[in-house]
């Protein structure tokens, strides 16, 4: 994870602020690869499965990595979506960056996960420092997929649109007495708040108008399947993508961008197989997919008069929320060593007092802004990003280029509850607010609306 030890650090490291050359043409290419691991691996999420050491027994539907490559001038940005519970650890991401740079000339890489709980477990630090074989194989396949996308780059035009659908709810219910009740499933669809029904869609066509890609951005945990499921699955996300592609007769590749789903569950969360889990998964994915397809069909794409790609990945130092020593003792006492592995990166070479969180910002053609956060932000941040964005089309993506568990709002952190004040919430309160503010500043800089000199010190025109 590359965590800093100096608790007094108060600086920001810019990993890259890049832009394409002026007068560039936008080109795009897509590809997908199967990254389904073999059975017999620990599965991601759900304490009961981990406690009972239950391993994957097979595959319900394949896990995929889908890649979109955008090129403008000498800049190539690769966006990779994964049917996994989280993104890979720092070492694997570094290998993927190197592979894509050497094989495909990728300048900037965005890797994001859907957060399905029906995938293999992923850790930041593995025993012996060696990632499991399936992860290394997946990195190689993703690299080849990006090569394929680059080999099929076409002049492209873009358009964005929005719809609305409710497939989920806010699982944290704040009570009048100040307590919080966790509503883990909601099959009767009781309204809760906040929740964001917005379906944000980016459509990419070739210059000839042929649909090339449909990006769907929505916030909802892919957890229709519960802990009794021991087979790999993309959950409702796979059904959503297939629904969109079927509506377009298989022409475009559909990519799912998970939003700020930290407190949002699907209505039929953790449905046992004996109670119709597959049917509930299909209902959830079809509802989202039909609305996304409806929106995508209504979008009229346009070519940019001057295409541009502006990208930044900045690292913000953020303190650990809890006392590291007491936190370690509490993890071992409450959960034992097996659960402790999920937080082992906090204690490599001694306890960490500070974390380094990557904030990823991408501005396409000066009109479409993406922010990526490395974890599970609460849904408020997604709505806030759209409301405050200086450009009309603003996409919010969680689980991006790293993973640091939950990012609650300051208010939620004071109220408590899962994702707000438990052991899966170890980043300092206010971290996501800082990341969001930083991304907004970056977009304003990319638009040329923030200067590096005070107004009264600029040279006269």
Image (spheres, rainbow, N blue to C red):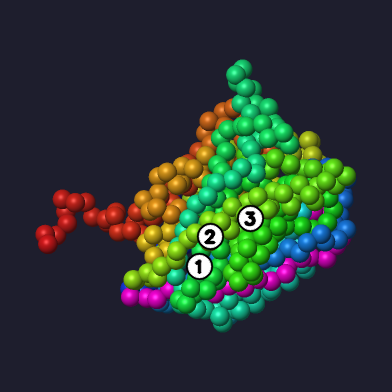
Q: Which residues are magenta?
A: 23-44
- Residue identifier under label 1: 204
**Could you say which is closer to the camera, residue 458 or residue 255?**
255
Give the alpha-carbon distance from disc 2 to disc 3, as whole Å.
Answer: 10 Å
Callout 2: few (<14), some (14-19), or many (20+) C-alpha neighbours within 10 Å?
many
The residue shown at (16%, 54%) is 457
Could you say whether the residue bearing mark 2 is in a helix, strand or loop? Answer: helix
The residue shown at (87%, 49%) is 53
**Closer to viewer: mark 1 or mark 2:** 2
Could one spot residue 278 in this view of the protein? yes
- Magenta stretch: residue 387 in it? no
**Could you say which is closer to the camera, residue 410 or residue 59?**
59
- Residue identifier under label 3: 289
Whether 332 is drawn above or below 122: the answer is above
**Could you say which is closer to the camera, residue 423 or residue 374?**
374
Q: Earlier in the sequence, mark 1 or mark 2?
A: 1
Give the alpha-carbon distance from disc 3 to disc 1, as whole Å.
Answer: 17 Å
The residue shown at (53%, 50%) is 163
List the single residue furthest toward the left: 460
Is residue 238 found left or right of 279 in the rendered image? left
Could one spot residue 396 in this view of the protein? no
Residue 34's x, y, as percent? Answer: 72, 69
Quarter of the image with the N terminus is: bottom right
Could you say whether the residue bearing mark 3 is in a helix, strand or loop? Answer: helix
């Amino acid at each position: 994870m590359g965590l800093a030890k100096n608790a007094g650090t108060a600086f920001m490291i810019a990993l890259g602020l890049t832009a394409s050359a002026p007068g560039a043409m936008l080109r795009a290419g897509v590809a997908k690869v199967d990254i389904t691991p073999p059975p017999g691996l620990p599965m991601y999420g759900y304490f009961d499965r981990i406690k009972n050491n239950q391993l994957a027994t097979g595959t319900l539907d394949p896990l995929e990595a889908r890649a979109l490559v955008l090129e403008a001038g000498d800049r190539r940005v690769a966006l990779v979506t994964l049917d996994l519970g989280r993104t890979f650890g720092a070492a694997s991401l570094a290998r993927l960056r190197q592979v894509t740079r050497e094989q495909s000339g990728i300048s900037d890489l965005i890797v994001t996960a859907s957060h399905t709980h029906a995938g293999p477990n992923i850790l930041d630090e593995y025993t012996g420092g060696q990632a499991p074989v399936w992860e290394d194989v997946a990195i190689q396949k993703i690299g080849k997929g990006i090569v394929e996308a680059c080999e099929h780059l076409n002049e492209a035009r873009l358009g964005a649109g929005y719809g609305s659908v409710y497939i989920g709810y806010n699982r944290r219910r704040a009570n009048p007495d100040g307590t919080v009740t966790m509503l883990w499933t909601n099959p009767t669809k009781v309204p809760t708040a906040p929740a964001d029904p917005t379906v944000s869609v980016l459509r990419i066509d070739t210059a000839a108008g042929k649909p090339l890609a449909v990006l769907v951005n929505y916030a909802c945990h892919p957890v229709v399947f519960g802990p009794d499921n021991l087979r790999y699955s993309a959950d409702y996300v796979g059904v959503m993508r297939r629904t969109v592609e079927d509506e377009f007769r298989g022409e475009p590749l559909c990519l799912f961008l998970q939003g700020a789903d930290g407190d949002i569950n699907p209505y039929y969360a953790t449905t046992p197989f004996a109670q119709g889990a597959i049917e509930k998964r299909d209902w959830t994915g079809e509802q989202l997919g039909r609305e996304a397809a409806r929106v995508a069909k209504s979008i009229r794409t346009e070519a940019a008069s001057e295409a541009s790609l502006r990208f930044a990945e900045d690292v913000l130092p953020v303190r650990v929320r809890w006392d590291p020593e007491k936190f370690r003792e509490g993890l071992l006492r409450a959960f034992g060593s097996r659960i402790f592995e999920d937080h082992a990166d906090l204690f490599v070479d001694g306890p960490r007092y500070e974390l380094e969180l990557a904030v990823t910002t991408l501005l396409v053609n000066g009109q479409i802004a993406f922010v990526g956060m490395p974890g599970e932000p609460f849904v408020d941040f997604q709505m806030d990003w759209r409301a405050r964005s200086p450009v009309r089309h603003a996409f919010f993506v969680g689980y991006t280029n790293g993973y640091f568990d939950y990012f609650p709002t300051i208010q939620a952190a004071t109220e408590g509850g899962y994702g707000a004040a438990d052991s899966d919430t170890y980043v300092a309160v206010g971290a996501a607010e800082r990341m969001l503010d930083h991304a907004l500043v970056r977009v304003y800089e990319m638009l040329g609306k923030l200067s590096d000199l005070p107004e009264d010190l600029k040279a006269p025109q």
